[in-house]
């Protein structure tokens, strides 16, 4: 450190805005940010029993999902 030049140490992080990216990158960023609104929500009732057990989803969770997303009964 005693003989180190101050210009030798550069940041290891990428700049927040990269100027070398294509002009479509803004469109792609907007598309990916809105993708979560367009995609349907996760529905555990469409999984098989094996997939549910691998993911740790119990029958109790399925009953709660059906109760929350089912039709309202008067």
Image: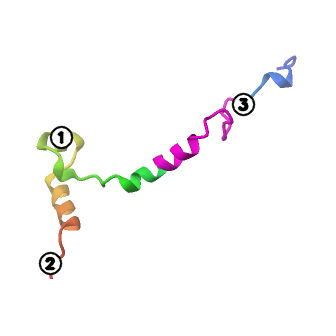
Q: Is residue 17 left or right of residue 8?
A: left
46 to the left or right of 19:
left
Q: Residue furthest bottom?
A: 74
Against 2, residue 10 (above or below) is below
Q: Residue at x 21, y 51 (%)?
A: 44
Q: Nearer the viewer, residue 61 or 34?
A: 34
Left or right: 49 with respect to 65?
Answer: left
Query: In the image, what residue occupies the spot 47% across and 48% down?
Result: 31
Q: Which mark is residue 73?
A: 2
Separation of residues labelled 2 and 1 (CA atoms):
31 Å
Residues in magenta, as a range: 11-32
* Residue, disc 1: 51
- Of circles 2 and 1, the one toward us is 2
Q: Which residue is mark 3?
A: 11
Frontmost residue, 13 versus 71:
71
Looking at the image, is mark 3 or mark 1 earlier in the sequence?
3
User: Residues under labels 2 and 3: Cα distance?
Assistant: 60 Å
Residue drawn at the location 77% of the way across and 25% of the way down? 9
Queried whether the magenta region covers residue 18, the answer comes back as yes
Q: Residue at x 85, y 25 (%)?
A: 6
69 up-or-down from 5: above or below: below
Name the image colouring. rainbow
């Amino acid at each position: 450190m005693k003989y180190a030049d101050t210009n030798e140490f550069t940041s290891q992080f990428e700049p927040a805005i990269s100027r070398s990216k294509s002009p479509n990158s803004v469109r792609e960023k907007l598309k990916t940010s809105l993708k979560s609104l367009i995609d349907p929500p996760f529905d555990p009732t469409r999984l098989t029993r094996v997939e549910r057990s691998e993911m740790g989803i119990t029958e109790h969770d399925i009953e709660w999902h059906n109760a929350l997303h089912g039709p309202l009964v008067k």
